[in-house]
Image (cartoon, rainbow, N blue to C red):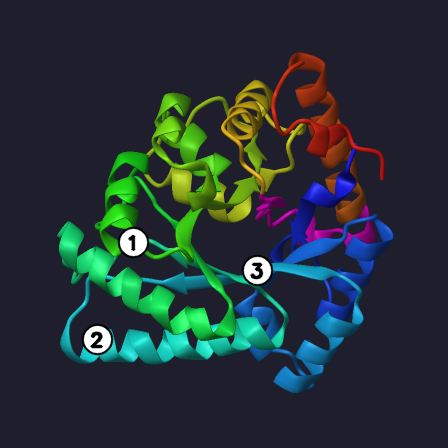
Amino acid sequence: MNFGLFGLDSATLAGTLEARLAAARRAGFVHVMISASDVVNHPAGIDTAIESIRASGLRVTGLEALRDFEGLTGKMHEYKVDVAKSMLELCARIGGRILVTHASTSAHADSSLEHVARDLAKLAFLAMPLDIRIALKGFPWSRTVRGFSGATEVLAIANCQNLGLAVDSFDIITAGTPLDELDLVPRDQIFLAQLSDFMVQEIRLPGERDVTARHFRVFPGEGAHGDALVALITRLEDNGYSGDYSFDVYNSDYLEMPADVIAGRGRIAADWLGEMVLRRTLEVPNMKRLHAAG
């Protein structure tokens, strides 16, 4: 299989930025998602962090995450534009070509399609000179983009080639989103697929979803939703998805374990996931990406 399709998120591993990058490389990963906090909070400064990332030999999957950008007005909008410019510059400096943007949950955000699309088009326009794509991640609890239907409407109104979607398996599974809704999204408008699993069969208590999302995600193959993850990847590949898969695993227990151990578990997850998809799928157009030698 082509292991290079799968990448780690730097927030999954414990230790210094340099130690985490080295652990990912030793496990065989070739690309990594970088959290902005890893760069701006580096004890030796931003320039050292950027140099470490570029010297690691790892390709940058993208930078995350710009939050609550769209739907605001006045001073709040101006403030978020300044934040966006800073993050875009940082993304370019680390060699990233995708900025992950979370759909707004702000109570002050206007949810009208025209306003949301106008703001996201502005963000995409700011990213164009830097050759960066904006991967918008919608949430069921967002005020602006809650599902694939709304997302495709926003993308159509904004009409920017460098504006697309980030698909997160955790959100799809916990919200019970039918995979048929993925068929609404043109294949070239999904820029990133983020993968994780979780242990419980279903989210039952108020607030349990947020706690699980932030502290108890696990790698594919370690949780209770392996079949759903396989079905998601199969549908994405069947629809012609050609981007990266990034393990978006936030787990407080993982941060108490050596980075090499967790990176190794990520490698096992990638091998398992590729094998499971190959075993269940015979004629998926892009599946040669998963079983190509290399």
Q: Nearer the viewer, residue 141 or 289?
A: 289
Sequence order check, earlier mark of 1 and 2: 2
- In this rendering, which labeled residue sits more in front, label 1 or label 3? 1
Label disc, if present, on residue 76 of the rendered structure: 2
113 relative position to 174: left or right: left
Q: Is residue 260 magenta?
A: yes
Q: Say if mark 2 contacts mark 3, CB within 8 Å.
A: no
Q: Is residue 164 above or below residue 285?
A: below
Q: Say if mark 1 contacts mark 2, CB within 8 Å.
A: no
Q: Is residue 54 above or below residue 66?
A: below
Q: Nearer the viewer, residue 158 or 279?
A: 158
Residue range in magenta is 243-261
Q: Is residue 204 visible?
A: no
The residue to which callout 3 is attached is 62
* Residue drawn at the location 77% of the way across and 31% of the way down: 271
5 relative position to 201: left or right: right
Q: CA distance from mark 1 to mark 3?
A: 22 Å
Sequence order check, earlier mark of 2 and 3: 3
